[in-house]
Every structure is written in structure tokens, then in C-alpha cells.
Image (tube, rainbow, N blue to C red):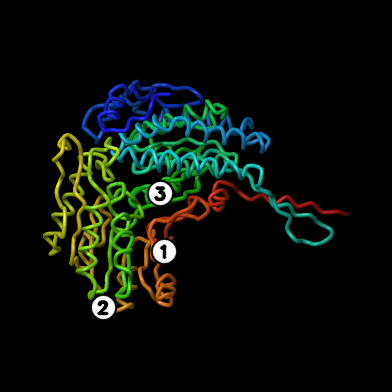
Amino acid sequence: MLDRPTTRAGWEARAADLKPEGRAFIDGRLVPARSGRTFEKRSPVDGRIIAAVADCDAADVDAAVAAARAAFEDGRWRNLPPAEKKRILLAFADRIRADLDHLALLETLDVGKVIGNALAVDVPFCANCLQYYAEFADKLYDEIAPVGPDDTALVRKEPLGVIGAIVPWNYPLIISAWKIGPALVAGNSVVLKPAEQSPLSAIRLGQLAKEAGLPDGVLNIVPGFGESAGQPLALHPDVDMISFTGSTEVGKLMMVYAGQSNMKRVALECGGKSPHVVMADADLDAAAEGIAWGIFYNQGETCHAGSRVLVHRSVQAALVEKIAAVAKAQIPLGHALDPAAQMGALVEPRHLERVLGYVETGRAEGARIACGGRRATADGLEAGLYMEATILDDVAPNARVAREEIFGPVLVVTPFETEADAVRLANDSIYGLAAAVWTADMNAAHRLTRSIRAGTVWVNCFDRSSLATPFGGFKQSGFGRDRSPHAIEKYMDFKTVWTAYR
């Protein structure tokens, strides 16, 4: 094993030698797209082309679904003894850990996240998730319903069949594991469609699963674009469920496609505009640290990023100043292959332009730019897609930047006067993915957490998480939970077997 680089130059040398696999992974084999087409994968880190990726379409989706269906029907995975399923999934997790540096580098080059976080968070969390669900393989019980002495009603939990999993580009490894883990432990076969911006680590997952002993056809990886690969997967009549994480706009299309095809099940985790409610009595130092990390970590490309701050007017100025200080001191922007950096590159040019456009929109709407607001080109960053940590202060509640998901390192700050105003503003959104409350008054905290409509509400912290807790949203942030034991049942159905004794 090569020694891990400790400098940007070392990681750049490692990246120069990397030859990522870009073919699809179908029925246990790496295969080109049936059309022969590829697309160039260009890294946001420095703009260079790092791979030619299979440009899959409906023909490739058909092949992947056929492989998944055959694997499901002949029982090569779902009928394995639970202990054997557990052994293979644990081996899968171990293969991911052994491939740590390789996977982390793929993830950084693919999407621009900093190498330190890819090493410490993304790859380990992916492996931990698969291990977590592996441990359920021999702990899933059927039920006996209480129907009386002359009958037995067995309630069986059975896998759905073929799962189509469509994942976004911001946390490719982590979110793929959130779907693969519970779907596989439930006994299903999976066709995973990664975002076109982030195909490389997903393809590698397919290879590692095979090395771990997962039978051919049980996990298939189909890279490609949403219109040419994602849509055919969602419309496919032999897919039993689509598990989707991405934008609310595309999530709505998933529901349409389900209705247009075979009424397949749909689970959605979509957009967010998560508010921090900061009361006048809050610990402002703690709040500032939680808020800064909650929006600037991963360049703000996080679905539940705390992108709105609702703060009591009496402490607004002091809080904004502290958030800016935390960003400057603790979350340095730098080259994504620099181990010292905490903010890296945005994923692609059009996304960078979109985020910068929102900053200009905010300025035009009357917001004050308290810090940042520009593309970063100093210190050798000019070839990549880097943007400064940005705070828009005094944002009106009806401003576009206060209501629309920006998905970048942009924080909007809006003052309030009363607790009732804070609740109203927090809930005045089409989204309901997450929220946070900062206060020294636990009675107020209880009232606020009960009143705010969001799938997760943190109190005096932000982004604390565990695989044991479900993750998902209310309203147009979607439905259906990832993580926790609850996620497993989403990939299963209930069958009643009733026996009468005479």
C-alpha cells in the first residue's frame, strides 16, 4: 500500500497517476455503454479531464434491470441464509475501508470536496452504513398477529424486488450507502444510477461489492445523464421502487414516472432551506460555530445545510460578526487536494455561476454582503471552481435568496422580534428538511421544536447525526426516511399468511 500523501503536491501527484474506471457495472462485469458513447468527466478541482465515462441510456438500463430481476427471481441473494448475507455485507464494508485513499481521491476529483473530509467522513461513513445494515441481516423477524386460538396469522416481511436508486452528487458514497445498505439487507436487487457529475466512486463500489462476494446482478451501476438513464430507470416497468435523493423539481417527476409506468413505490429526499432560530438569550459563540459549519462545510452543497438564520434583532449584528470570524478562522477555503483546506470547489461551472447569480440577486433585493460574495482565484485556485464563504445580511423574508435553495456557501440572515415571528418565518417555506433552535430557555426550545415543521430539529447544535436516527423531511422536502431501522421496511412489503385450524 502506498503511503498516504500529507501535502497538496503529494495528492496532486497521486491524482496524476490515477486512471479511474468509467465503464458501467452490470451483472458483475464492467461494460461499455451499448451505444459505445462516453462523456468526459472534468474535475472541478482543477478543470482537467479525469475519465471517459459510459454514457448509458435506456438499453443499458434494460440490461441492468434484467440482471437485477434475474438475480432476484432465482434467489441467489434473497434466499441466502441471514448469516451469509451478513458476512458478505460486512466484507463489503471492509473492502471499502481498505480502499480508503483510492475512494477518497475519486470523490474529491469527482465533486471538489476537500480530501481531508473525503478521508475522514465520506468513505468511513459509507463503510459504517453498510456495516450497520449488515448487522440487521440475522435480526429481522416476522410477526404473529393476535387473532385467536383457532387461527394463526403470520405477517411476513418480504423484499420488494428490483430497487432503482438515484443519488445526487454532493455526498455520492454516503447517500449511495444509505440506499444500498437497507435495500440489500432486505433481500432486494439494486440498480444504482449516480449523478453524471459523480459517477466514479459509484462504479468503484460495484467492483468492491463483487470482490466481497455479492452475487452477480444484485448490485448494478449505470452512469449517465438524468434524461437518458435516470428517466428510463424511473419509468421501467420491471422496477418495483425508486429511491431518489435530489432536487424537489426532479423528485416530483419521479412521482409522475411512477404513475405513468407500473405504480412503483417512490421514496423521496429532496431540497431544503433549513432555518436556524437564534433567540436573544442564545450562546452566540456556540451558535456562530454551529451555523458557520452548517452552511460552509462541503461548500454549502448539503441538502439540509442551515442556509437561513432567523435571529432576534437585538443580537443580529453580534451574531453575524461571530459567524464571519468562525468561517475565516476555522473553515479555510483552499485547493481540494490540500489537506489543510476545509472548503473546496463547487461541482461544475454552471453551478458556480448559479450560486454567484444568487448573490447578485440578493444584493439587488437589498441584502448587505457581510463577507465573501466572490469567486476565489488566489493561491492557485483559478483553474478550479472555488467560491468564498458568503453571508447576506438583512434579507427580507420574501426575497428569492430567502426562499429558494441556493446549494452553495451562501448564508442569508433575517431578523425577527418575537418567538411567534420566528416560528412563522421558520415554517414559511415549501421545505421542511431540518432546522435548529438556539436558546438557553428549554421551555422555549420545547415550544419551538414542537412548532417547527421539519424532519430533524436540533437544539443548541447542528448536524449531529447517527445511523440510528431517521433522516428525511416534511412538505416538499420529500417523504420516506433514510438511515435507522425504519429505512429497511421501506424496501419491504408485508404479506399475511393466515392458517385456520379445524
Q: Position of residue 294 (x, y in %)?
A: 32, 55
Front-lying residue, 497 or 385: 385
Mark 1 or mark 2, earlier in chain: 2
Tags 3 and 1 touching, CB below 8 Å: no
- Disc 2 crowd, CA 10 A, few/some/many (<14, 14-19, 20+): some
Report how far apart the C-alphas of labels 3 and 1 lie in the structure.
30 Å
Give amino acid for label 3: Val
Image quadrant in which you'd find residue 295 = bottom left
| Residue name at image x 30 percent, y 64 percent | 285
Give amino acid for label 1: Val
Mark 3 or mark 1, earlier in chain: 3
Image quadrant in which you'd find residue 473 = bottom left
Give SS at disc 1: strand
Mark 2 or mark 3, earlier in chain: 3
Residue extending farthest right: 502
Q: Look at mark 2 in the image and give the residue it sits on.
A: 417
Give SS at disc 2: loop
In the picture, measured across the screen, residue 498 lies left or right of residue 413, that is: right
Report how far apart the C-alphas of labels 1 and 2 lie in the structure.
21 Å
Q: Look at mark 1 in the image and give the residue it sits on.
A: 457
Give SS at disc 3: helix
Q: Position of residue 83 (x, y in %)?
A: 67, 37
Front-lying residue, 36 or 264: 36
Q: Position of residue 414 (x, y in %)?
A: 23, 68
Front-lying residue, 289 or 27: 289
In the picture, measured across the screen, residue 252 lies left or right of residue 152, that is: left
Q: Look at mark 3 in the image and give the residue it sits on.
A: 256
